[in-house]
Amino acid sequence: MSILTPFKNLMQRFQPKMMAVGINHNAELSEKDAFISRQIPKPKPAEGELLVKISASSVNPIDIKTRVNYHLDGIFKVLGLDAVGEVEALGKNVDDFVVGDQVFYTGTQPQIGTNAQYQVIKAALVAHAPRELSASQAAAMPLTSITAYDILHQAFGLTVERDSVQDKTLLIINGAGGVGSILIQLAKYIGLTVIATAGNKESRAWEEGLGADHVLDYHEDLAGQLSKLGYPKVDYIANLQDTDAYWDLMVNTIKPFGRIAGIVTNTKPVDIGALKEIGAQFTWVFILARGNFNHNLQEQGDILTKIATLLDEGELKSTATKFYQGLSVESLKQATKIVEGHHTLGKVVIDYQEDEQ
Amino acid sequence: MSILTPFKNLMQRFQPKMMAVGINHNAELSEKDAFISRQIPKPKPAEGELLVKISASSVNPIDIKTRVNYHLDGIFKVLGLDAVGEVEALGKNVDDFVVGDQVFYTGTQPQIGTNAQYQVIKAALVAHAPRELSASQAAAMPLTSITAYDILHQAFGLTVERDSVQDKTLLIINGAGGVGSILIQLAKYIGLTVIATAGNKESRAWEEGLGADHVLDYHEDLAGQLSKLGYPKVDYIANLQDTDAYWDLMVNTIKPFGRIAGIVTNTKPVDIGALKEIGAQFTWVFILARGNFNHNLQEQGDILTKIATLLDEGELKSTATKFYQGLSVESLKQATKIVEGHHTLGKVVIDYQEDEQ
C-alpha cells in the first residue's frame, strides 16, 4: 500500500460520478439482469476530446451483436454508439467546438458507450447537430447516415451531391431498417433509381414514403421481380441483410463494372471469382473500423456536418420511428427488444431528458 | 443460292488476305497441330477503329488459358492480345491517329487476335508507341502495364505520379512474371517500398534489378520473413500468383484499411469476412473486362500514353527477356512453351519483322 493510498481513496469519494446502463455478461434479453445500471466515474476529456452531456441515443443492431458476444463476465460494459448532446468541457487542442454546442456523433466501440449521462469523444468524429431536429430525431442518424454515405461514396465511388448521378439503378436489400431508411433518401438525393426490398405491407409503405422508386417483396423471387420491372441487371447493390443468402442473386444481378456493398459479415466462404470476369467488385462497409483503428476520424465529422445540413434543409428526414423516455434499464430493454425483433422500421431512439416530452 | 452468289464468290477470290497463326481445338502444346497457320481475310476498320499492320506481339498467360479452355472445335481462333504496329488505315471518326503512326495496345478478346499480320482495333484502346524502344521491347508492355497501373490506381486508390506515396509498403506475390516485372518498377516510381516474392536466385536477381527493396523466398514461410524484415504487416498486397493459396497469408498480413488486389481467379470460395472488421478490401483487377464489355476504353489508351512517356524517359524499362523471330507456327509454339513453363522472367516476345534483326 503506497503512502498516497489514503488520499487516493479520499479523492475517489469526491470524484464526480454519472449514471450508466450496461451489461456484465452476454445475457438473453429476457433475463432480469440483462441490463443493469451503475454509478461510474464521470470521464474527463483528454487532448482532442470533448466531454458531452448526452441527451439522446439510438439502438443499432451492432449493440445487440456486442451484447450477445460479450465474454468479459462480471466486467461492466456500457453499450451505445450514437449520441446527441451538449458539449460540457473541452480537452486541449479542440478548435471546432465550444462549451454549450449541440453535437452528434458515432464511431468508436469503447468500454463505456453512449448509454450513460456523459461520454468523452474525439472531436474529429463529432459534428454540430442539425438545428431543426429534436435531440431524439437527430440521435437516430449518425451511425446509419455515415454507413449510407460510405456505401455511396467509398464503395460505389459516387459523389454525394444532388442529382450527380444519371440513369443508374441501386438495389437495396432490406430498405426498411436503420441504414436502408437513410440510404433510400441519400440515393434518391444524388439521382439514383432506387429499388428496395421489403417483407410486409408496412415496410413497403415506409420505403415508398422515403422515396423508393420500386419496392420488391423479399419473400418472392427477386430476380423475377427485377426482370418484370425492366431492371434484370442493376448498377449497384447494397446488401444490408444477409451476405451469404443473397450472394448468388447479387452476382447474377450486378451489371458489368457494377459495385456491391455489404455490411453484414458472411458466415461461410463466398465465391468472389464470379465478379472478376465482368469487372465487378464487392466492398465491405464497416464504419466502426475508423474509430477502432484511429483512421481518418475527421472524415466522420465531415460526413455528419453534411448530413446535418441536408436534414436542416429538409432534403433528408429523420428515420426515428419509436421513442423511449429516460435512460434506464427498462427503457433500454424495451428499445433493444424492438430492434432485436428484426422488423423495425427505421430507428429506435431513447431520449435521456425525461422531463421535456 | 442467291442470284448474287457467283459475284460474291468472285469478290472473295480478290479480297485481300493475311496470314494468321491460331488454334482450332484445345490442344496440348506437344500436339503437332497445337498451332496452325491460315490465310484469312484482311479486316477493314469500321467507325472509330484503326487497321494496324502488326510488327510484334507478346505471349500472356491468358493466351494459354484461352487455348486450354477452347471449345469451338474446328473453328479457327487467333490468340494474342498485345501488339505493336503501324497504322495502315483509319475508320471514320478517328482523330488521334494518322496513317503511318507507330502504335501499341491491348484489350479485347476477339476471335482474331494479334497473332496475325493485321488487326482492327478500337482507337480508344490505342496509344502512340514509345519512340525510344524497338517494336519487340514495346510489345512486352501493354497488357501488363495496364494491369499494374490498374492495381495501383483502381484497386489501391493511388496516384501514379513520381514519389506521390510516402511510407507505404507493397507486397507483390510473384514479382518476376510479366505483371510483377512492371509493377515493381511502377510501384518504386510512385514511392512505395516494394517487397516481392521469388522462387529462385535468377528471379531474385531480376527483381532486385528492377528495383525491389526486398525479395522473399516463396518456398519458405513468408510471414516469418516479413516479420524479420520489420514489416509484419503491409499496406498493400498484389497477388499475381494464386488467390486461394495465399488468402490466409494476405488476410493476416494486410494492415487495417489496407488494400489487396488479385488477378488470378480463385478456385474455391474464400472467407472475405476477415477483412471487414479491419476496414480492408479485396479488389479484382481484370483489364480485359473493359474491352469485352466496351467500358471506358479510352482509359486504356490514356494509360498506355503515360506508360509510353515513362518508357521514353527511362523511368520504366521494357520487361521483354526472350525474343522469337517471325510470325509462324514454330515461333508461337516456342514462345508459348516458355510462358507455359511458369518460370518466365518478364515477357516473351515475337517479332513479326523477320528481316530486321
Image: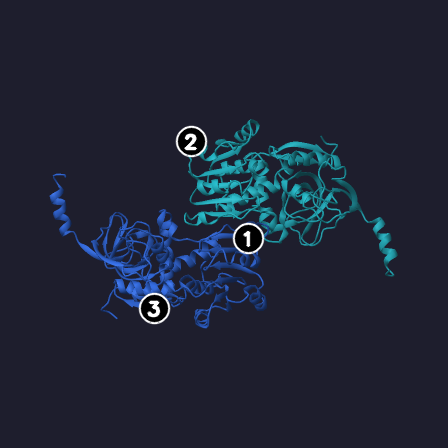
Chain colours: A blue, B cyan
Q: Residues within 10 Å of mark 2 (few under 14, many from 20)?
A: few
Residue A219 appears at what percent x and percent y? 51, 67
Q: Position of residue A280 (x, y in %)?
A: 55, 53
Q: Are marks 2 and 3 on the same chain?
A: no
Q: Between marks 1 and 2, how big is the CA–CA gap? A: 37 Å
Graded by Cα atoms within 10 Å as few (under 14), some (14 to 19) or many (20 or more), the crowding at tag 1 reads many
| Mark 1 residue element | loop
Picture layout, residue A203 above or below residue A82: below
For the residues labelled 3 and 1, the Cα–Cα distance comes to 38 Å
Subunit bearing disc 1 = A
The reply to whether discs 2 and 3 touch (Cβ–Cβ < 8 Å) is no
Question: In the image, B58: left or right of B251?
Answer: right
The image quarter in which residue B333 lies: top right
Q: Is residue B328 visible?
A: no
Q: Could you say which disc has been placed on residue A280 in the image?
A: 1
What chain letter is assigned to the residue under label 2?
A: B
Give the residue at x 70% y 52%: B91
Distance, label 2 to label 3, CA atoms, is 55 Å
Q: Which residue, given by chain and number where applicable, does mark 2 sit on?
A: B228
Q: Nearer the viewer, residue B357 or B167?
A: B167
Element type where label 3 sits in the image:
strand
The reply to whether the C-beta atoms of the residues labelled 1 and 2 are less than 8 Å apart is no
Residue at the spot 47% in from the left edge and 48% down from the top edge = B281
Residue lying farthest front? A31
**Mark 3, mark 1: which one is toward the viewer?**
3
Residue placed under numbered mark 3 in the picture: A322
Instruction: Indicate left or right for B227 with A217 as reference.
Output: left
Mark 1 vs mark 2: give the one in front.
2
